């Protein structure tokens, strides 16, 4: 069967795969050229700021334009090479998340330290320290700004089908279907799931709309070639044990194929893994990775400061909305929602009331069933006209800034869970209550109300495991764009 499939692999499929690889090569070249220009521009800008401004904290120094321009010419390729060593030209690490920006910052910092060490080793090699510090800051800011702009360009190209990987999912189980649905809905991710590989369903079975089973795992290599696949995601943990050797064998033959493992929903833990050996047996040790120490202090500082500034700046809007809610329908202005916080401690999360007080009487048995299963109603008759606008713009959640100020919530975190919703999360709830729920989070920028419980768990677990200040700032920025567009709200 493998030979037959290999024989029908068309030249058009191979040509398309080669075209995608060529497009990626040009994208990487473009990134490198842009990085080089930003590095050179940052060094030159730092030179101008250091030697041609009257800033009081800089003493007069020798500009030596020839020396510094020669030095810049030598440092630019070294800086670009550092970017490469930090994985900034690896397609698997680009155009998503915040680690790309953190890598730029780390590469620039390491480059600065290397130059400082060089000045100590060679006393005759004298460089203005003010220029070095300014160069570090200017290069980092310009390079991060360029990568941010490049990411926007790539997102536009992906809307038209460019720089998109063709992927297959190994395993049509619930985990595999959830991964496929999430990837296909996130166009910016640049991944198109073309089908599933599964032993339990016959080829042609449509697992998701437009995403069929392509064949069994034994035909993995042939399917990858015939379908022009660039990457594969293993989503079935049972399959990992039984079929992974066959997949590894195919990886040797298909050297350009990228294979990744998707964490099963039941295996998602908020712990770090450390390899250790005991009695010549390799073991994986689990370490708790809660937000502690300096990270906790920095997050608390941003939360309390941001909440206080937000309440002060938005106080006129909050007063206006409170008045409108009071005039719109009878009932209290603020709705108190009982939710679960850190350590299973419950508290009242504040929201502007968006429903009629007697709204429950409007629910039919069918709507009550839908509400019980999903926790949301897409066409909820209880919501007032003003409430619908407040929800679409997320203005109804602004009173939760008080919860943030009180330390019950965070500006960014997992989505809050009500007491009634706990039963939907089962064993995962113990991990979800290790950090404070957020006013916004990955769920807010990935679909908001359209997400199911499985997707919510995946996103919240990813946030808890990969927390950083950079990630919080990125989520806050993306939240503004999502709220303005009204994406996924109802």
Image: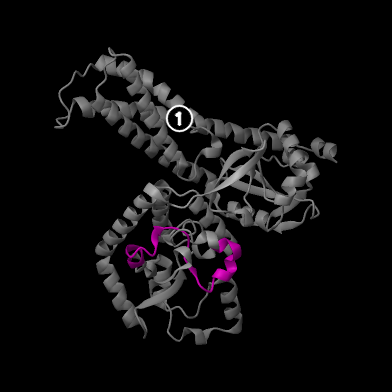
The foreground one among 241 and 140 is 241
Q: Height in image: 420 above or below 475? A: below
Residue 452 visible: no
Tell me how the rendering is colored.
Answer: one colour
The foreground one among 77 and 416 is 416
Left or right: where 36 falls relative to 372: left
Q: Which residue is mark 1?
A: 83
Q: Height in image: 50 above or below 195? A: above
* Outermost residue to the front: 279
* Outermost residue to the top: 124
Q: Which stretch appears magenta? A: 402-429
The foreground one among 26 and 224 is 224
Residue at x-position 35% and y-position 82% = 332
Residue 441 visible: yes
| Image location (x, y in percent) of residue 186 | 55, 52
| Image location (x, y in percent) of residue 477 | 39, 52
Mark 1, secondary structure of its residue: helix
Neighbourhood count class around disc 1 (C-alpha, 10 Å): few under 14, some 14–19, many 20 upward: many
Residue at x-position 47% and y-position 80% = 382
Look at the image and say whether residue 422 sits in the magenta stretch: yes
| Image location (x, y in percent) of residue 348 | 40, 73
- Among the 4 quarters of the image, the one containing residue 138: top left
Left or right: where 245 falls relative to 287: right
Q: Quadrant of the N terminus?
A: top right
Q: Height in image: 110 above or below 13? A: above
- Among the 4 quarters of the image, the one containing residue 3: top right
The foreground one among 111 and 75 is 111
Left or right: where 64 falls relative to 203: left
Look at the image and say whether residue 397 sits in the magenta stretch: no
Residue at x-position 45% and y-position 49% = 467
| Image location (x, y in percent) of residue 144 | 39, 38
């Amino acid at each position: 069967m493998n030979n037959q499939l290999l024989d029908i692999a068309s030249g058009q499929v191979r040509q398309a795969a080669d075209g995608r690889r060529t497009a990626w090569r040009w994208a990487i070249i473009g990134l490198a050229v842009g990085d080089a220009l930003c590095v050179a521009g940052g060094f030159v800008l730092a030179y101008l700021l250091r030697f041609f401004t009257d800033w009081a904290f800089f003493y007069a120094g020798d500009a030596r334009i020839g020396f510094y321009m020669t030095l810049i010419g030598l440092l630019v390729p070294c800086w670009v090479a550092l970017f490469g060593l930090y994985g900034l030209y690896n397609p698997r690490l680009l155009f998503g998340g915040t680690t790309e920006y953190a890598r730029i910052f780390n590469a620039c910092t390491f480059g600065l330290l290397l130059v400082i060490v060089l000045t100590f080793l060679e006393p005759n090699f004298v460089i203005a320290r003010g220029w070095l510090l300014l160069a570090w800051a200017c290069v980092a800011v310009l390079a991060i700004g360029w990568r941010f702009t490049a990411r926007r360009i790539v997102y536009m190209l992906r809307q038209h089908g460019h720089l998109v990987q063709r992927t297959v999912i190994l395993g049509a189980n619930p985990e595999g279907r959830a991964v496929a649905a999430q990837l296909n809905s996130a166009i910016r991710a640049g991944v198109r799931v073309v089908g599933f590989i599964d032993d339990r369903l016959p080829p042609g079975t449509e697992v998701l709309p437009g995403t069929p089973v392509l064949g069994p795992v034994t035909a993995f290599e042939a399917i990858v070639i015939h379908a022009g696949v660039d990457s594969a995601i293993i989503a079935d943990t049972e399959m990992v044990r039984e079929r992974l050797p066959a997949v590894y064998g195919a990886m040797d033959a298909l050297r350009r194929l990228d294979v990744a493992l998707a964490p099963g929903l039941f295996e998602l833990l908020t712990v770090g893994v450390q390899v250790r050996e005991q009695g010549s047996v390799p073991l994986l040790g689990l370490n708790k990775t809660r937000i502690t120490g300096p990270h906790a202090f920095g997050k608390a500082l941003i939360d309390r400061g941001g909440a206080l500034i937000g309440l002060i700046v938005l106080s006129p809007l909050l007063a206006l909305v409170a008045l409108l809610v009071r005039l719109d329908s009878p009932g209290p202005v603020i709705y108190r929602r009982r939710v679960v916080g850190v350590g299973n401690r419950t508290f009242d999360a504040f929201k502007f009331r968006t429903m009629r007080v007697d709204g429950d009487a409007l629910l039919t048995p069918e709507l009550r069933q839908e509400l019980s299963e999903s926790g949301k109603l897409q066409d909820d008759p209880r919501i007032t006209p003003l409430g619908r606008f407040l929800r679409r713009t997320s203005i109804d959640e602004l009173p939760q800034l008080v919860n943030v100020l009180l330390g019950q919530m965070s500006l960014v975190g997992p989505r809050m869970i009500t007491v009634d919703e706990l039963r939907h999360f089962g064993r995962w709830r113990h991990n979800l209550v290790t950090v404070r729920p957020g006013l916004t989070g990955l769920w807010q920028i990935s679909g908001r109300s359209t997400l199911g419980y499985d997707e919510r768990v995946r996103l919240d677990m990813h946030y808890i495991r990969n927390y950083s200040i950079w990630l919080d700032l990125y989520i806050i920025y993306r939240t503004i764009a999502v709220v303005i567009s009204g994406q996924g709200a109802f």
